[in-house]
Amino acid sequence: MRRLMLWAVLILLASVPLGADEPVLQGFTMASSPVERQWEQKFRYLPSPQLMRDYMQRLSARPHHVGSPYDKSNAEWILSKFKEFGWDAHIETFQVLFPTPRERLVEMVEPTKFTAKLQEPPLAVDPTSSQSSEQLPTYNAYSIDGDVTAPLVYVNYGVAEDYEQLQRLGVSVRGAIVIAKYGHSWRGVKPKVAGEHGAIGCLIYSDPRDDGYFEDNVFPKGPTRPAEGVQRGSVMDFASSNPGDPLTPGIGATPDAKRLSVKEAPSITKIPVLPISYGDAQPLLAALHGPVAPEGWRGSLPITYHVGPGPAKIHLVVKSNWDLKPVNDVIAKIPGSTQPDEWIVRGNHHDAWVNGADDPISAQIALLEEARALGQLVKQGWKPKRTIIYAAWDGEEPMLLGSTEWAEEHGDELKQHAVAYINTDGNGRGYLTAEGSHTLEHFMNGVARDIQDPESGASVWQRDEMHSISEAKSEEERKKIRDRADLRMGALGSGTDYTSFADHLGVASLNLGFGGEDPDAGVYHSIYDDFYWYTHFSDTSFVYGRALAQTVGTAVMRLADADLLPFDFNDFADTMQLYLGQLKKLAEDKRNEAIERDRELDEGLFHAINDPRRPTVAPPREEVPPYLNFAPLENAVDQLNRSARRYQEALQKAWASSQGVPPAMLADLNQKMMESERRLTDDAGLPRRSWYKHMIYAPGVYTGYAPKTMPGVREAIEQKRWPEANTEIARVAKVLENESALIDSATAELASAK
Ligand SMILES: [Zn+2]
């Protein structure tokens, strides 16, 4: 899974106030809103912290990675729970490529000998840490097999800017093995960028500065990473090709699906890669000479960080069993009473790297309590209008295998029927973090206003607002937060199961979770992420588990019951305006940087400031970027803002009129709301990665989990492909024009209601 996300700040329309004590819910009528509120109140009373604790103990009792016996056992147990709660449920199985380690070796062969342990020791106090025979060894899944020996180079976090710094230091990684720190990018970016610069192997380690003793006491005294703890994780290059099974891109990995060979699979790394602990990394780093690492590169180990290359020389061996394994998705359903063909889909994965109490069970238990509570409401007579589908995904950790295969297999149905997808993946103490499609931003603000924060007693929305104000960097930022009605949601990147729904199918999606009050979990993807750790250092009383169930369940109910689907385009249009401004500034900054760089070269600046004892190399001359033509996008965003406003006005008028909106028109409008996110996709997809169809949101090719908004344009500018930037500006403008046309047709329909 990925770690946290942020709300920021923004505007919006208040919910339509219509006199009663509580505002009428967005998408409901004066008559239907109070009924909905009563059912929601009943619902929020039901989730039980004690039951969640019990579920966690059961689901994290043994290691449960893809293909393991306990993974299957958990799927069957979750299935039995859904049935017990009164849901129509089944398991859907796919066959996916899942490599597991056959051979792993990291040894220093020069100037001294050292062999890395590559082993996390059990701790007496932590009962499940000793289940060694069932634990997956520490490794990075989908690393190519390799056996390489070469000098070592330290590359900081191993992102593109770090290689520019290396170039200034006169250090090349060609033919070398690099060692990079975890953090500041998704892990798979590190071997990708290293390989592009000519490295032949990659080690990734967790520096104690980032999630170890610099942050807090190490486990078991505190929550952070001990010296021999290792972060496992996938390095599949999903962002440049596709997530899911590497052998069946774009289609479901059913038993008889047409498969690529492992050699043909585009998402397997180009160089071998292995994760190590800081216990294993320290002797290697200590044996490096060459330039002292720039200040920002230094971690918290008691050594002077040097860059290399060498004299440390490393022998790295990685070999895997390249087997197909089953993934077992548990799919459960409550059929809709009046609009069964409109689906609200909600998911969380159940597989883990090891015991995975935090990732993913801490949010899987909320999903189960939502399911129990919704089942009870049905028994009490609640009839959701729309169909509700709950999914406990398998195979998320290797790279979204279960959710991607299911979404690909059912792609046509989902494009026709899916209203929205709501995801969670882990939960902790603190603030509600939300990211998602901005057509649902106003809706999500409404939900957050109705949930009580367990620690402060305020609404989670109020607490988030206060937190944003406290974190704001300037008077101007604080003013923006205070002046605006709604909090702003972050955009979706990737790293968890919403990816196929949002990026491939164009289903409006949300990703939710609480966190922020505990230090970054240093047990992430290690054998120490287990029941003992969670019940000592995270949401120990499970009250935030209950808050998460209340938040997500309320959102699901509101979407399932609304008379008119609560999509809103004002906040969406406003967000597009913001992205447009960012892109124009980015292009301008690139121009100015290039002009400044070339001027400094002409002035002889780099020669003049060179220190002969610590020599640096002047950077290469930059081509000054041309001006881009943003006009099509400026016009499209402008039009979108007008269309959004007119829709809102027409809606308020029609909703307030004595006749309301006639049922046939409502059905048609709901279809249009469902289509609104689909309109933001383009079947040809993004340049060089056509699996990604959404023109507004995508994971970054060089960030992995972190989002790139208007990604075709943004990445073209970042990567200096100027003609492509102009082409992509026109493509984004086109989808926004189509969106405006859809909104205008809804407005015209509303205006015809008398
Ligand atoms: Zn996860």
Image (cartoon, helix red, strand yellow):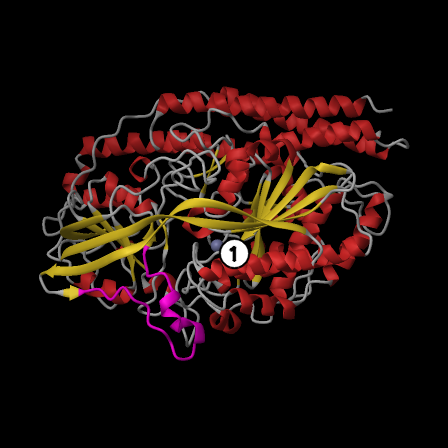
**Residue 60 appears left or right of 623:** right
**Residue 84 appears left or right of 591:** right
Quarter of the image for residue 488 reads top right
**Residue 173 x, y percent position in the rendering:** 18, 45
**Residue 594 appears left or right of 491:** left
Range covered by the magenta-colored residues = 115-139
> In this view of the protein, can residue 549 be seen by the observer?
no
Residue shown at the point (84%, 49%) measured from the top left: 34
**Residue 563 x, y percent position in the rendering:** 78, 38
Q: Decide whether residue 613 is among the magenta residues.
A: no
Q: Is 423 above or below relative to 727?
A: below
Q: Decide whether residue 129 is among the magenta residues.
A: yes
Residue type marked 1? His
Residue shown at the point (33%, 47%) measured from the top left: 142
**Residue 115 x, y percent position in the rendering:** 18, 65
Q: Is 502 above or below relative to 695?
A: below
**Residue 238 appears left or right of 555:** left
> In this view of the protein, can residue 476 be seen by the observer?
yes
| Badge count | 1
Residue named by callout 1: 350
Q: Is 484 above or below relative to 469?
A: above
Quarter of the image for residue 616 reads top left
Viewer-nearest residue: 618 or 244: 244
